[in-house]
Image (cartoon, rainbow, N blue to C red):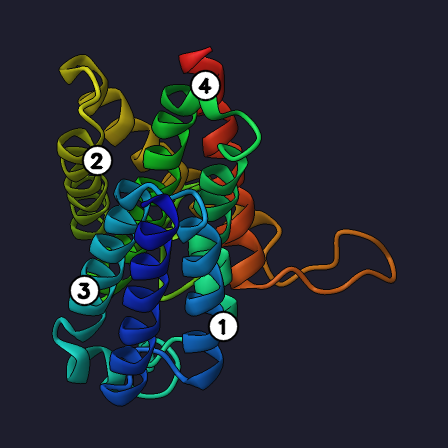
Amino acid sequence: MEWLIIGLMIGFCAVLALVANHFRIFDRGGCLAALALGILVSLTGMYQWLSLLFILMVAVYTSTRFRFREKESKGLQEGKSGCRGYKSILANGGVACAIAFSTLFFPHKVFMFAFPFLVAVASANSDVFASEIGGISNNAYLITNLEKVKPGTNGGVSWLGQGAAFAGSLLISIAGYLLFHLPLKLVLPAALLGFVGCQIDSVLGATIEGRRLTRKGPVLGKEGVNLTSIFLTSVLAFGLIA
């Protein structure tokens, strides 16, 4: 029975990848990356992990298409026509998938992993909402010194974006509460940690994005900042739940 469930979950991932490719939600590389992450999560046999990632995908697509032409006119759209590639998929979903996959090695501590997983997804959605919805705001301020900057500047934040960031985190937190049957008292902490993850992302964006961490190392791009902020937030979640 367990292998049947795993097979159905993998099949669901394959269908989603085809749908995402057909409707240009992800490009071909993005679809393959999403499929690979989906298969890893499916191996756990727990539909809750996959369901929350599906909700994240829908939320990301919806926010990306929100007033898309307006963002495109400002040069703030995601990729080509809002189509996300493999780097974005791995950056926003990689940490959560790694946490879910780790439960295969710690089957009796699933609850301990559920909260950090939820926070990782909440942090990813919080940042996407901040960028995609906050991107339409004409007033942006650098998070490190509050100087007014051009919308879309690395580390730039706005009141609209901050509100959207918390809403995006809260949305995932509530969905995770319903899926994982976590204690109600953890809903707000999860939402707040997801929101904090977005702030970490903004600080990293304002300070080190576009720079080399070592003299000959690669330039840290947007996806690297996303991955780092989500990872750090997940570590905070593990510390809180331990």
Q: Residues within 10 Å of mark 3 (few under 14, many from 20)?
A: some
Q: Position of residue 39 (x, y in %)?
A: 45, 59
The kind of residue tagged 1 is Tyr
Q: Where is residue 102 in the image (x, y as percent from the top left)?
A: 54, 36
Q: Mark 4 points at which residue?
A: 108
The quadrant the N terminus occupies is top left
Residue drawn where x is 86% and y is 57% of the image: 215
- Work out whether residue 138 can be spotted: no
* 60 and 202: which is toward the camera: 60
Q: Where is residue 99 in the image (x, y as percent from the top left)?
A: 49, 37
How far apart are the alpha carbons under marks 4 and 1? 32 Å
The kind of residue tagged 2 is Gly
Q: How crowded is mark 2: few (under 14 residues within 10 Å), some or many (20 or more)?
A: many
Which mark is first along the chain, 1 or 3?
A: 3
Q: In which quarter of the image is residue 178?
A: top left
Vertically, is 215 above or below 143?
below
Residue drawn where x is 38% and y is 75% of the image: 84
Q: Mark 2 points at which residue?
A: 176
Q: Mark 3 points at which residue?
A: 63
Between disc 3 and disc 1, the foreground one is 1
Which mark is first along the chain, 2 or 3?
A: 3
Q: Are marks 4 and 2 in contact (CB under 8 Å)?
A: no
The kind of residue tagged 3 is Ser
How far apart are the alpha carbons under marks 4 and 3? 36 Å
Q: Where is residue 223 in the image (x, y as percent from the top left)?
A: 52, 61
How far apart are the alpha carbons under marks 3 and 1? 18 Å
